[in-house]
Amino acid sequence: MEFKKCTNCDDWHFDNEACSPAYIVTQCDTGISTKVRGVSHWHAARFYGIKTWHYIENSHALVGQKMTVDVMDERGESERYILSVEFCANKVEQDKTIPI
Ligand SMILES: [Zn+2]
């Protein structure tokens, strides 16, 4: 059992694991479709957002980034999501002086 980049789906998973299902993510603004693998519509939508925004290093450029996407699974079932940077990974400032 080896954790590696799969030559079939281009994703990282164990070599004895099945590839995650493919989803077609379409940006509603541009109509551009991208194939994304994930375990659910939501997961695929979120992963698409991360892939789209991860190269932005200027935090000001990231603020307020939003896009609407349609996520379609292999059976043709479609769900719509609004992606925002804030939902992708919203860091919470913790006061570590207060014991939990
Ligand atoms: Zn795979």
Image: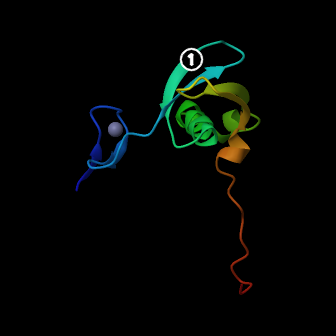
Q: In this view, which residue lies farthest toward the left?
A: 1
Of 80 and 78, the residue lying toward us: 78
Query: Which is more toward the observer, 96 or 52?
Result: 52
Q: Quadrant of the C terminus?
A: bottom right
**Image quarter of residue 5:** top left
* Amino acid type, label 1: Ser
Assign ligand 1 to one image quadrant. Answer: top left
Q: How many marks?
A: 1
Quadrant of the snapshot with the N terminus: bottom left
For image coordinates 71% across by 46% down, the residue present is 87
Q: Is residue 60 above or below residue 90?
A: above
Q: Residue furthest top?
A: 31
Is 2 displayed left or right of 75 in the figure? left
Query: Could you say where residue 62 lies in the image, as x and y percent from the top left?
Result: 68, 36
Going 72% across and 27% down the picture, which residue do you hit? 67
Q: To which residue does mark 1 refer?
A: 33
